[in-house]
């Protein structure tokens, strides 16, 4: 059986190249945030909406869930 994407990433392997050309980018609920996300081919792409030319970060669904839960719990609060 093939390894999961998460197991591959833990071993240092990368996710496949995704074509984000036609991705439907979504901003936060206010529509004015710098962070945008798109759901593409079973992955979640995240980019800086003010600098869309900078490569997007790509997450597996498991990685995205861990990120969102950590953010909700204040894991990334720098104040």
Image (cartoon, grey):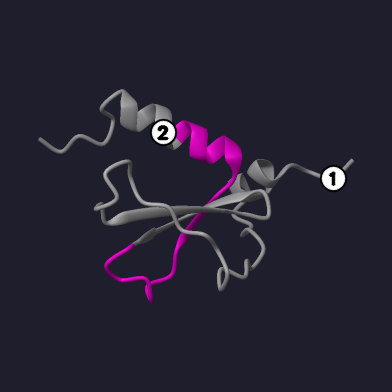
- Residue that mark 2 sits on: 68
Query: Residue visible at 46% across and 58% down?
Result: 25
Q: Is residue 78 above or below residue 57?
A: above
58 and 38: which is toward the camera: 38
Where is residue 63 drawn, in percent x and y? 53, 39
Q: Secondary structure at mark 1?
A: loop
Q: Is residue 43 magenta?
A: no
- Residue, far top: 73
Horizontally, residue 14 falls left or right of residue 72, namely right
**Distance (Cα) linking label 1 and label 2:** 27 Å
- Residue, far front: 30
Q: Is residue 58 magenta?
A: yes
Name the mark on residue 70: none
Horizontally, residue 15 falls left or right of residue 28, namely right
Where is residue 27 drawn, in percent x and y? 36, 51
Horizontally, residue 7 falls left or right of residue 61, namely right
- Residue that mark 1 sits on: 2
Query: Residue visible at 61% across and 60% down?
Result: 14
Query: Residue visible at 32% across and 26% down?
Result: 72
Q: State which quadrant residue 4 falls in.
A: top right
**Stretch in magenta:** 49-66
């Amino acid at each position: 059986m093939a390894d999961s994407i998460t197991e591959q990433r833990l071993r240092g392997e990368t996710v496949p190249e995704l074509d984000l050309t036609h991705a439907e980018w979504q901003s936060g609920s206010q529509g004015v945030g710098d962070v945008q996300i798109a759901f593409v081919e079973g992955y979640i792409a995240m980019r800086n909406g003010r600098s869309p030319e900078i490569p997007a970060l790509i997450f597996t669904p498991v990685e995205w869930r861990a990120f969102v839960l950590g953010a909700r719990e204040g894991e990334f609060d720098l104040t």
